[in-house]
Amino acid sequence: MTRIRSWLEREPWFALLLAAAVAARLYNFRHPPDDAHEWRQTQTLMYSASYGHGAGWLTPFSNWNGAPPHPGVLELPLYSILAYLTSAPFGLLASARTWSFASSVAAIYVFDRLCVRLEHPRRRTATLLFALAPVAIFYGHAVQPESLLLLLVVAAAYGLVLGAGAGWRWTLLGGVALAAATLIKPTALVMLAPPLALQAWRLSSLPARGEGREGSWLPAGLVLAGSAAVALAWGLYVRGVLLAADPLWYSVSTAPGWVFGELQLRFHPFLYETLTQRLAMILLPPLAAGLILIAVVGGRGHAWWWAWAAGGLLSVLVFSRLNAVHFYYQLPAVPALAALAAYGFPAWPRSLRARGLAAAGLLTAAALGCRQLYAENPIYHDAGAALASVASPGPVLALSSAGGAAWYPVVLFYSGHDGWNLPLDASAEQVAAHPACDLVMVFDRPSPPPPVPPGWTETKRTSEYLLARSSLPACGEGREGT
């Protein structure tokens, strides 16, 4: 306690800004996910919930289709497993959010220690820019494995940097963390490969301490080869599992063109305009990206950070399609970007008033970036709650708004019912083939929603969804509800 009190007295401005960054991660803590990537967050909850329905540890499912469950996971489900194992006291949502929050706060601490190790001259500023990055705040709140990914990435970097001078144990720990991060997002390996190679090259030109021989590339080579081998083995395992369960799902969702993108995409302005917008708004506090240019002009920055940033660019060239569509594939680059931006950050003013204005400006910038990520769109949750209020026991039918893709039946998850999930353009024959009495459609596409299929009577319609009841005598009138 004395040490903490001394730190608070010595750096109160840093403590207050850091506390604000941590508090922002607790926003809507018990609220169902209805912000950015709401379907992906709910899918993660479904993966966790599936363990209570008999799913294997490595093969959680999210279909809720009233049929033999098909696994649909592509990444190591470590986050889903942790959320499920600790869900008993307060529920699955609170458990998952706690893991996101704890991983995010731990990542801030490890990043700060990494800045110490790399002798960052403005470590506190770098830590604040990292903690206040809108994307880092959001994933400290979101029900997705990205917060755990960020912790693993900075832990891998810390272990590998420390291992260069403290022995193979830290290198081994860093390698394990990197392998785990790679199984969540392959961009992590691509981003950390350049700084690790740079470190190995520098060490290879120096004699090993007290051993009278030249340093070697062996540790770095083993880490990179081991992580790549683990990723390849996992990819082959997932491919076999998904192909056995549903060949169409795999061919559509993980085809090479969908993952890597066409060659011309790497030369298309759209890709780099999209990435620039993200860098300017959510990967760092808005306008902070300009500080990196100041660092470039001034020739500042540790080579580790610059090599890490180069790995970020390399990941864009390798996984162009993924990076163009999803912003969370850039997440492993955020620590390097924050550290580099801190080199261009002006010195904090000595005047307390001026320092307060600077702090308020940084918080405002972070809030502007968070605004678009926290934008609420509770369509699936609302439709599921409405369906739960009227659905009779037994299967229900949900028509997804995802066109030909019906793999995210989050409406059924929020309704608490098993059932059938079909694409919005399903034929009357497809609908009739699945015995059910209740139906829900969601309207998250700009085109006008279609009418209910033949044999169904619409019972409620809002701007988000409609509910319908089968006219079959066996279905009766159903329950009254809102």
Image (cartoon, helix red, strand yellow):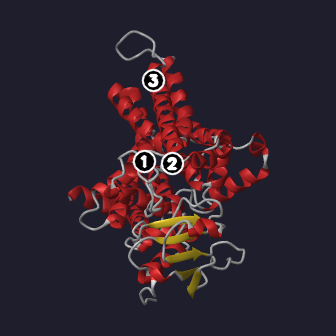
Per the image, label 3 sits on a secondary structure element best described as: helix
Q: Position of residue 196 (x, y in %)?
A: 51, 30
Residue 79 horizontal side relative to residue 373, left or right: left
Question: Which residue type does callout 3 highlight?
Answer: Leu
Residue at the image position 53 percent from the left and 61 percent from the top: 408
Task: Decide which of tag 2 and tag 3 comes sooner along the chain.
Answer: 3
Task: Rate crowding at label 3 as few (under 14), some (14 to 19) or many (20 or more) other CA atoms within 10 Å.
Answer: some
Circles 1, 2 touching at the beta carbon (< 8 Å): yes
Residue 364 horizontal side relative to residue 94, left or right: right
Task: Rate crowding at label 1 as few (under 14), some (14 to 19) or many (20 or more) other CA atoms within 10 Å.
Answer: many
Question: Which residue type does callout 1 highlight?
Answer: Phe
Give me the disc on residue 469: none
Give me the disc on residue 335: 2
Q: CA distance from mark 2 to mark 3?
A: 24 Å
Q: Position of residue 141 (x, y in %)?
A: 43, 64
Residue at the image position 45 percent from the left and 16 percent from the top: 215
Per the image, label 1 sits on a secondary structure element best described as: helix
